[in-house]
Image: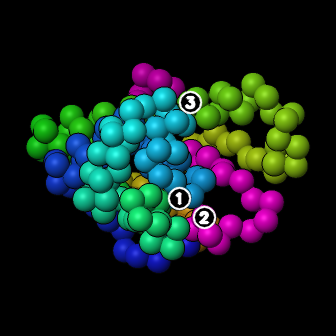
Amino acid sequence: MVDTPPRLLSDVDTLKAFAHPLRQRMLTRLQRRGPATSADLAVEFGADRGATSYHLRQLARYGFIEEDTSLSAGRRKYWRFIPQDLRLPRDLSDPDVTAVVEQIGRQWLERADRDLTAYLTNRAAYGDFAAAAEHSFGATHLTADELARFGAEYLDLLNRWHRRPEDLPEGSRPITVLFHAFPTPEEQV
C-alpha cells in the first residue's frame, strides 16, 4: 500500500525527468518486477549501460527511485522504485508544464494500449487471471465536484491494493489498471 500523501509533480524539471521515454520504461520495470542494476536494464532495453546508469541517477535525483542497499555491493548498485502516489498537475496555465504533461499522458496511453492489446490478443494464456479480469465501459452524470471526488475515491481504492515488490503474495502478477473519467464531448455521443 502507498501510505504517503500524494506527490504532485508540478515542477517542470521534475516533470521532464519523469517524462523521458526510457525512464518511463525503467520505472515501470522497477515497479512491476523489483530492483535491478543499470547493467540489467541495459540488457533488457537494448540500451547503453552508461545511458541507463545516467537515467537511473536522474530518476533518483528527482525522488522516483532509490538505491536498494540490501542488494547493492561495491560498484554494483541495485535500484528500486519508491512506491508513491504520483499526480500530474491539473492547472495547465504554464505552457511548458502543459507540453510535458501532454507528453506523459500520450506515453501512458500508448503503454496502456500496448498492454491491453497484448492481453486481449492472447487472453487464454492468462488462465485464472483472464477469468478474474474485469472490463467495463460505463457512463454517468456528475457535477465537476462529484467528478473530482469520484477520481479521488478511485485513487484511494487503487492505493489500498498497491504492494511493494517484496510484499507480493505468491501467485500474484502485475495487473494493469486503466481509468479514465472525463466530460463526454457532445459530438461523440
What mark, if any, has residue 62 been given in the picture? none
Which one is nearer the viewer's eye here, 155 or 110? 110
Please, what is the three-letter code of the amino acid marked with disc 2? Pro
Residue 186 appears at what percent x and percent y? 41, 28
What mark, if any, has residue 165 been given in the picture? 2
For the stretch drawn in magenta, the main secondary structure is: loop
Mark 3, mark 1: which one is toward the viewer? 1
For the record, the magenta segment spans: 164-189
What mark, if any, has residue 113 been given in the picture? 3
Secondary element at tag 1: loop
Please, what is the three-letter code of the amino acid marked with disc 3? Asp
- As measured in the structure, the alpha-carbon distance from the residue carrying label 2 to the one carrying label 3 is 24 Å
Number of numbered discs overlaid on the protein picture = 3
Q: Residues within 10 Å of mark 3 (few under 14, many from 20)?
A: few
- As measured in the structure, the alpha-carbon distance from the residue carrying label 1 to the one carrying label 2 is 8 Å
Going 51% across and 73% down the picture, which residue do you hit?
Answer: 70
Q: Is residue 44 left or right of residue 64?
A: right
